[in-house]
Amino acid sequence: MDRIIKFRAWDKDSEKFIDWSDDADTLHFNGNWELETDTSFGKDIVVMQFTGLTDKNGKEIYYSDLVKAPNGKIKEVIWEYTYLEELDRHCKDVEVVGNIYEQK
């Protein structure tokens, strides 16, 4: 199975998602696995990886997203193998309703 590897980043300083549409905007990890940027983004950046799954509306599901189950419960998407297997089986029944950074 092919899996798409994608990321998005939350800038805690500006409290916004970083728009990587500008080619000048780059993020990279240094030798200590710390995130660095050569742009005007803040220094406190959180990177979230795409799970490879979409919700019932076709919206991409990223780690740290909040998804709503058919029973109304809202859960955070986390990296845990058994949790991801469960999400994979039921992703067409859940809906992304936000993420832990924008939902304060």
Image (spheres, grey):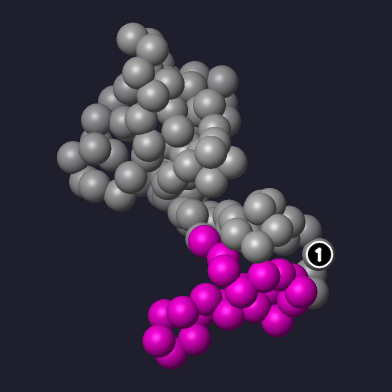
From this view, report whether residue 24 is shown above or below residue 82.
Answer: below
Report the residue that reaches farthest toward the front: 104
Asked if 65 appears above or below 21 in the picture, the reply is above
Residue 100 position, x and y percent, is 48, 42
Q: Which residues are magenta?
A: 25-46
Q: Residue 42: x percent and y percent?
A: 67, 70
Amino acid tagged 1: Asp
SS category of the residue bearing label 1 = loop
- Camera-nearest residue between 61 and 37: 37
Residue 10 lies, in percent from the top left, at 59, 56
Task: Please give the name of the residue rendered at 33% of the width and 22% of the height, measured from the top-left corner.
Answer: 90
Q: Which residue is mark 1?
A: 22
> Which residue is at a point 53% across and 55% down the rendered structure image?
6
Q: Is residue 76 above or below residue 30?
A: above
Residue 55 in view, yes or no: no
> Main SS type for the magenta part?
loop
The answer to whether residue 102 is seen in the rendering is yes
- Going by the image, does 93 lie left or right of 38? left
Residue at 58% from the left image edge and 80% from the top image edge? 36
